[in-house]
Image: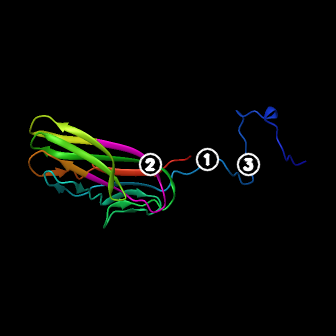
Amino acid sequence: MAIDKIQSESINLADNFAFTGTVTGAGGVNTPAFFARCSTQQSIANQTVTKIQFDTEIYDTDGKYDNSSNYRFTPGVAGKYNFTLSVSLDDVADQGNFYLYLYKNGSAASSAITRVRGSGVEKMTSFCHWSDTANTTDYYEGYVYHGSGSAEVLRPDLATTFLGYKIIT
């Protein structure tokens, strides 16, 4: 006998169920998603907003992050996304402000600031997190700015990363 309707009072939701058909409308996927890092040192001139060259993909589920020419993520799928930008400077020479920017379509959309106190700081890391509703053609990039008096170098390791993923709504 086939059951074509189950009343909520007659089912124990704590039980396990084995479905043999197709279940629709349950869950979702967090893709597209990407995680990229810098694999080479990048020099950042003083008082210059500079695009970060996240040139190595840790993963890129749908091939939507360009790690070779424009260093940007274009989702191709409309939805809500979370982004995290982590940047670490190596051997900060002077005091100054250190800014991170998440750009959307060529303009700063989110930022974070870290104040460098004292000179000769071995390493300085800052994070920027942001959520956004994207359409299929929006694009996202990471930028950095510092005002420490001389050129600084981004650390080429997992301290300088950019990631994003679609959230299930």
Looking at this rendering, what residue extends furthest in the bottom direction?
A: 69
Mark identifier at residue 99: none
CA gap between label 3 and label 1 equals 15 Å
Say whether residue 159 is visible: no
Q: Which residue is mark 3?
A: 19
Residue 156 in percent (x, y) is at 23, 53
CA gap between label 2 and label 1 equals 21 Å
Determine whether the residue tagged by mark 1 lies in a helix, strand or loop: loop
Q: Which residue is mark 2?
A: 132
Determine whether the residue tagged by mark 3 lies in a helix, strand or loop: loop
Say whether residue 137 is left or right of residue 156. Answer: right
Residue interval drawn in magenta: 127-143
Say whether residue 157 is visible: yes
Residue at position x 32%, y 55% from top? 107
Question: Majority secondary structure of the magenta segment?
Answer: strand
Residue 105 in percent (x, y) is at 37, 59
Contact (CB < 8 A) between labels 2 and 1? no
Mark identifier at residue 27: 1
In this rendered view, identify the residue nearer to me: 46 or 38: 46
Name which of mark 2 and mark 3 comes first in the sequence.
Answer: 3
Say whether residue 89 is left or right of residue 34. Answer: left
Snapshot quadrant of residue 122? top left
> Looking at the image, is 19 positioned above or below residue 66?
above
Determine whether the residue tagged by mark 2 lies in a helix, strand or loop: strand
Decide: few, some or many residues near mark 2? Use Cα within 10 Å; few <14, some 14-19, many ≥20: some
Decide: few, some or many residues near mark 3? Use Cα within 10 Å; few <14, some 14-19, many ≥20: few
Residue 80 in percent (x, y) is at 49, 49
Would residue 137 be counted in the magenta stretch?
A: yes
CA gap between label 2 and label 3 equals 36 Å
Would residue 83 be counted in the magenta stretch?
A: no
Amino acid carrying mark 2 in the image: Asp
